[in-house]
Image (tube, helix red, strand yellow):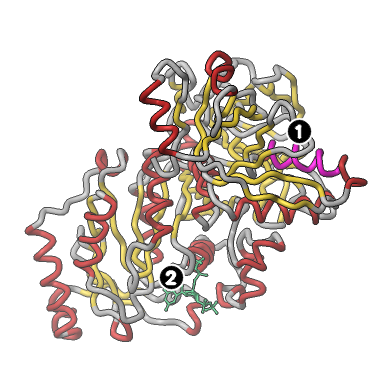
Amino acid sequence: MADPRAEASRRRTFAIISHPDAGKTTLTEKFLLYGGALTSGAGSVKAKGDRRSATSDWMELEQQRGISITSTVLQFPYRDNVLNLLDTPGHRDFSEDTYRVLAATDAAIMVLDGSKGIESQTRKLFEVCRAREIPIVTFINKWDRPGRDALELLDEIEEQLILEPVPISWPVGDGDRFRGLIDRQSGDFIRYTRTAGGSTEAPEEFVSAERAEAEEGELWLEAQEGIELLDVTERDFDAKRFQSGELSPVFFGSALTNFGVRLILDAMVDLVPSPSPRVDREGDPRPLEAPFSGIVFKVQANMDKAHRDRVAFLRVCSGQFDRGMVVTHEPTGRPFATKYAQSVSGQERETIEQAFPGDVVGLVNANDFRVGDAVYVNTAVQWPLVPAFAPAHFRIARTLDTSKTKQFRSGITQLDEEGVVQVLREPDVGNQAPILAAVGPLQFEVVQHRLENEFGAPVELVPCSWTTARITDTNSAEKLRGMSGVTVTARSDGELLALFESPYWLQRLEMDQPELTLTKLIAEGT
Ligand code: G4P
């Protein structure tokens, strides 16, 4: 038996968040290149078609829309470590999904486009990270292009995200004249050389300050001025403040040309915490060396058209996972034999034999598993409940082909269990016309597409006028049912949700009848 604590200390589990086009896919590829996990060179996966298969954009809809919805996991070695990179959906409409994935990570890299700075979805996804209180490493990408002033970008991070940016590296030159980076701690100048198409690692040369000044002249002096200004503002790295999400180490670079990629990978190993004991529902940490336990953070069906199966992704929280072991599914108390344990990267599946805290295991046909569930061996554990986000968009789903009612129902149940949307039912209407509730409207497109393509059940999704939902209880529900402008529904997890058309009306009701239970759901980005 390996020592789970020692194995955990080698692991880093993180996600990348970014506004579309900032360079998440490119950076992911470069991580694989530097991890030695991309033998044919990043250039070979640069072509758009192939490139998609390098990551998780495998669903048709994702390809059509150029968005990434589903999450997969890449594991690659770096130095003596094992890095687990969890992919998150790229669009804010799926921020609830991102939130669930972040429950399984210990940190996130926020990628910014150096010519754009913070964009709308960067902010949204950042807020989701903040809600999860995970440390964030910032990568300012595309420095090989004419961009914005480095100090101005730092100010933007500080002002807009209320996050203290602390540059760990500092660029010498930019655009065509981007020469390399100064490692602020050592003072070294790392000069890079471009390689054809960025398909191999960028050669690095460590240059002394004297030589750098002589050889880089003006660019070097400008960089020094920037660093002096940073020194005045005392932007120093502080591990505690990083881990509590107050401060973010900042790296500059260019994923395309590989400049700075090694530095950020080094940071993942040197700065990001390794998996630590996870706190259970009672608030007690479960030691890493405790018997095996894991948390389900994602359920995805029909990933592979040929198999049409269902995979539950779990992050190992304690102990050692061995394929074939029988684990207990906490909510049902049922045993589950883990014969089909896989790592899933896009459509590639490989059998996993062993896993340790921080690793992700895909369990095939774990049909009862839901997001947030605990699985364990020997000593039972429950994890804190994963809150559902407040839906702001509602549709009534109706089948367009009554001969497909059965498929329609099983499809809705499946998508509900995966957490693609929240499914609500009015007592009188029931299963005929469930109400779908979403954080963002793109979720409905996924539902419609999947119902039609995977279940053969074409649907119409009828827009509704509700805008806000509150959780209520049986007593209040009775009173609310008698009022106009409010509809009481039951969510499949048993919660009662009151839906309101007018937020003002709701506000008044809250003031006039404070005895009613109207609990807010977690808002997007709080
Ligand atoms: P995303 O996953 O965050 O959406 O971004 P992605 O990596 O797909 O990158 C978006 C575009 O930005 C791509 O160009 C990519 O080549 C480019 N890019 C990424 N990193 C850098 C960088 O460091 N410097 C420069 N100059 N460009 C970068 P594209 O034209 O959309 O695609 P492609 O045809 O180049 O593949």
Q: Is residue 526 above or below residue 284?
A: below
**Position of residue 89 in the picture relative to residue 430 (left or right):** left
Single out the residue that lies furthest toward the right. 403
Name which residue lies at 67% across and 29% down: 492
* In the image, residue 203 lies in the stretch drawn in magenta: no
What residue did someone put label 1 on? 367
User: Which residue type does callout 1 highlight?
Assistant: Asn
Q: Is residue 37 above or below residue 475?
A: below
Looking at the rendered structure, the secondary structure element under dot 2 is: loop
Question: Which is more toward the observer, 309 or 504?
Answer: 504
- For the residues labelled 2 and 1, the Cα–Cα distance comes to 39 Å
Q: Which residues are magenta?
A: 407-417
What residue did someone put label 2 on? 255
Q: Quadrant of the C terminus?
A: top left
Q: Position of residue 178 (x, y in %)?
A: 30, 80
Q: Position of residue 75 (x, y in %)?
A: 57, 51
Q: Is mark 2 within 8 Å of ligand 1?
A: yes
Name which residue lies at 56% across and 27% down: 319
Q: Is residue 41 above or below residue 87?
A: below
Looking at the rendered structure, the secondary structure element under dot 1 is: loop
